[in-house]
Amino acid sequence: MNVEFVVDRGPRHVAMRVHERGSGETRSCGTGACAVAVATARRDGADPAVTGTPVTYTVDVPGGTLVITERPDGEIEMTGPAVIVAEGVIEPEWLARAVGSA
């Protein structure tokens, strides 16, 4: 399971850190940030499905600041930075063995 730790920063603004199963603490988690924004909105009494008005929260994570908007139809939109944090090379022989064993 993944676990998010959240603190209030201000109106419709929270900070989050996440511990992801198998990885430990990570710099961000889009799914977790969206869930945190929706849960925080409900805690604050905001529900776009009821009011018909979108609600937006800012979620600070170690990897940057995300802006999460929940729309009345239930759609969730997340915007924020996307940067490459690692690169790697897969050896063709390893890949052939891995795919061949599947």
Image (cartoon, rainbow, N blue to C red):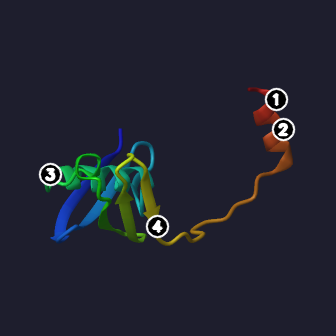
Q: Earlier in the sequence, mark 1 or mark 4?
A: 4
Return the x and y of residue 9 as percentages of the image width and height. Answer: 18, 72
* Side of 81 where 61 appears, left or right: left
Camera-side mark, 3 or 2 = 3
The three-letter amino acid code for the residue at tag 3 is: Arg
Structural distance between the alpha carbons of marks 2 and 4: 36 Å
Q: Which label was assigned to residue 18?
A: none
Q: Are marks 3 and 4 in contact (CB under 8 Å)?
A: no
Structural distance between the alpha carbons of marks 3 and 4: 22 Å
Mark 1 = which residue?
100
Camera-side mark, 1 or 4 = 4
The three-letter amino acid code for the residue at tag 1 is: Gly
Q: Earlier in the sequence, mark 3 or mark 2?
A: 3
The three-letter amino acid code for the residue at tag 4 is: Thr
SS type, badge 4: strand
Q: Which label was assigned to residue 43?
A: 3
Structural distance between the alpha carbons of marks 1 and 4: 38 Å
Q: Nearer the viewer, residue 47 or 62?
A: 47
SS type, badge 1: helix
Residue at 40% x, 42% y is 21
Q: Which label was assigned to residue 79?
A: 4
Q: Are marks 2 and 4 in contact (CB under 8 Å)?
A: no
* Side of 54 where 40 appears, left or right: left
Q: Nearer the viewer, residue 50 or 46?
A: 50
The three-letter amino acid code for the residue at tag 2 is: Ala
Residue count near mark 1 (Cα–Cα under 10 Å), binned few <14, some 14–19, many ≥20: few
Q: Is 54 situated above or below 75? A: below
Return the x and y of residue 8 as percentages of the image width and height. Answer: 16, 66
Q: Are marks 1 and 2 in contact (CB under 8 Å)?
A: yes
Camera-side mark, 1 or 3 = 3
